[in-house]
Image: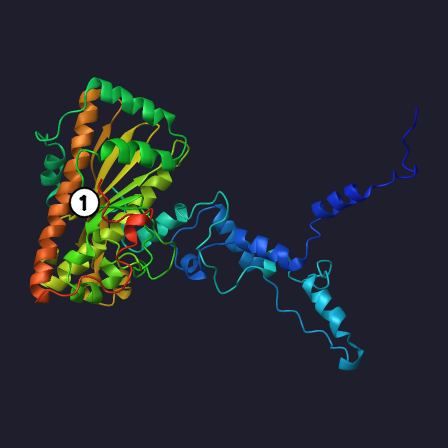
């Protein structure tokens, strides 16, 4: 039996083992390592953190701290070798393999630091397991006048038409047959079988919630055409569901004039003026993130309606009414929750400093309207389904009134679309104009 000692000759390492050790030691070319790390180091831009009123100890804030603390000065260029001494073929090959490994040099930026842009980093691709809808995100929204329900110092600020909207949500729909006990049981089984957000959307929302009231809607459409809500590009929202106006129904003059507020997508075939926004999570999704997503999308929708109303008649802006509804559903507690979002005039100079016109001297308030726990019993389930249909229909009525007034002000009927692409939406995941 062999004895082990510190002076024993190490066992011979096979070629395969050596390769494993090399991979473990990250001996990939530096350029490839930089690409991998760069993808993982996405964050909000520096201006986001500079203007945040309160910092939280999170992964993103620590990442920004590291970026600011450990970013070294640019290393001096080394003295160049004479051109006559350079073998161009060897130089090209050397560069393709990543160049010299300088990680052992003191103060030299390694792959982790070199891949970070000191001037700010795009948020198109987020780091794994790190949501953009963090505590800092919510604080940033609050700092810029977008308040969640019952937020101090004013507490609950309800819209003037709060009771009217709640009464509408609770109204039974005689023309819509009630779900039977068997259909309610089927819903519980289908909901329980969903393992991710996509299945919840396809099997529960589209397959059960929306079948009784077909209305044009968009699915998972990225809102990538809107002016930044806070002056800082944080993240492009992509609500799971939104109802809006078909582009063919709204005058092109109106869409062109207000396109960065009421035309959420760069695809001209997508719906305009969304004022019913719906967010969903899978069984393992975060309820907190679900709420923040609904708040962000809902405020953008409310701002679009507000800008359109300002263009129609600035004197009607201070009616303190809500024209936008955001809703959330999570399949574990089976909670279906509705919120109203409405603008309130702001005398805060900080908010006015961010506004280019008087129409933007406003903050936005999110108010909880009503909630239904759908697995309670078949009666509660039916009330929740009526509320879902009523909320969509109420939002459509508000859009129709605004659309008619906007078209009347715009003048004679104009071409339907601002550009090409009107035929592509029916084949995409977003499917604007699909029945639901």
Residue at disc 1, secondary structure: loop
Residue 242: horizontal and vertical position, in percent?
25, 46
Q: Which residue is mark 1?
A: 157
Q: Tell me the quarter of the picture where residue 284 sits.
A: top left
Which residue of the protein is positioned furthest toward the top in this rendering? 181
Judge whether 120 appears above or below 163 on screen: below
Residue beneath the point at 25% across and 58% down: 263
Judge whether 70 appears above or below 367 on screen: below
Residue beneath the point at 26% across and 62% down: 260
Of the pair 386 and 292, the residue shown nearer to us: 386
Q: What is the image's colouring?
A: rainbow
Q: Tell me the quarter of the picture where residue 31 sits.
A: bottom right
Q: Quadrant of the C terminus?
A: top left
Q: Quadrant of the N terminus?
A: top right
Q: Tell me the quarter of the picture where residue 97 sits.
A: bottom right
Judge whether 253 appears above or below 279 on screen: below
Q: Is residue 358 visible?
A: yes
Residue 35: horizontal and vertical position, in percent?
58, 56
Residue beneath the point at 18% across and 60% down: 307
Residue 329: horizontal and vertical position, in percent?
29, 35
Of the pair 277 and 181, the residue shown nearer to us: 181
Q: Is residue 320 visible?
A: no
């Amino acid at each position: 039996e062999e004895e082990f000692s510190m002076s024993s000759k190490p066992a011979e390492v096979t070629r395969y083992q050596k390769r494993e050790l090399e991979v473990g030691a990250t001996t990939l070319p530096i350029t490839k390592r930089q690409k991998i790390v760069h993808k993982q180091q996405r964050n909000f831009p520096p201006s986001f953190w500079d203007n945040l009123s309160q910092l939280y100890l999170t992964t993103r804030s620590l990442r920004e701290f590291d970026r600011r603390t450990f970013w070294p000065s640019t290393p001096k260029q080394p003295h160049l070798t004479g051109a006559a001494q350079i073998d161009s073929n060897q130089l090209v090959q050397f560069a393709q393999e990543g160049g010299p490994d300088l990680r052992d040099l003191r103060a030299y930026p390694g792959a982790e630091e070199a891949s970070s842009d000191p001037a700010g980093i795009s948020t198109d691709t987020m780091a794994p397991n790190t949501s953009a809808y963090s505590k800092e995100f919510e604080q940033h929204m609050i700092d810029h006048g977008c308040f969640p329900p019952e937020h101090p110092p004013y507490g609950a600020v309800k819209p003037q038409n709060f009771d009217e909207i709640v009464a509408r949500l609770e109204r039974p729909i005689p023309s819509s047959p009630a779900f039977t006990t068997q259909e309610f049981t089927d819903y519980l089984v289908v909901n329980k079988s969903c393992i991710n957000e996509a299945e919840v959307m396809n099997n529960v929302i589209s397959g059960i919630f929306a079948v009784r009231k077909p209305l044009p809607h968009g699915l998972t459409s990225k809102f990538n055409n809107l002016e930044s809500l806070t002056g800082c590009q944080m993240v492009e929202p992509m609500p799971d569901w939104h109802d809006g106006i078909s582009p063919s129904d709204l005058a092109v003059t109106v869409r062109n004039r207000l396109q960065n507020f009421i035309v959420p997508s760069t695809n001209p075939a997508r719906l305009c003026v969304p004022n019913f926004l719906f967010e969903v999570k899978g069984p393992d999704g975060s309820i907190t993130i679900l709420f923040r997503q609904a708040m962000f999308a809902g405020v953008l929708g409310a701002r679009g309606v507000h800008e359109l109303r300002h263009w129609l008649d600035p004197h009607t802006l201070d009616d303190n009414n809500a024209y936008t509804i955001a809703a959330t559903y999570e399949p574990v507690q089976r909670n279906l929750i509705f919120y109203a979002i409405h603008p309130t005039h702001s005398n805060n100079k900080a908010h006015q400093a961010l506004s280019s016109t008087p129409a933007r001297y406003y903050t936005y308030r999110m108010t909880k309207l009503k909630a239904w726990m759908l697995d309670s019993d078949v009666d509660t389930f039916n009330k929740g389904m009526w509320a879902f249909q009523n909320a969509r229909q109420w939002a459509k009525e508000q859009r129709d009134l605004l659309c008619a007034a906007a078209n009347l002000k715009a003048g004679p009927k104009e071409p339907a679309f601002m550009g090409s692409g009107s035929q592509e939406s029916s084949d995409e995941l977003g499917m604007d104009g699909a029945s639901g």
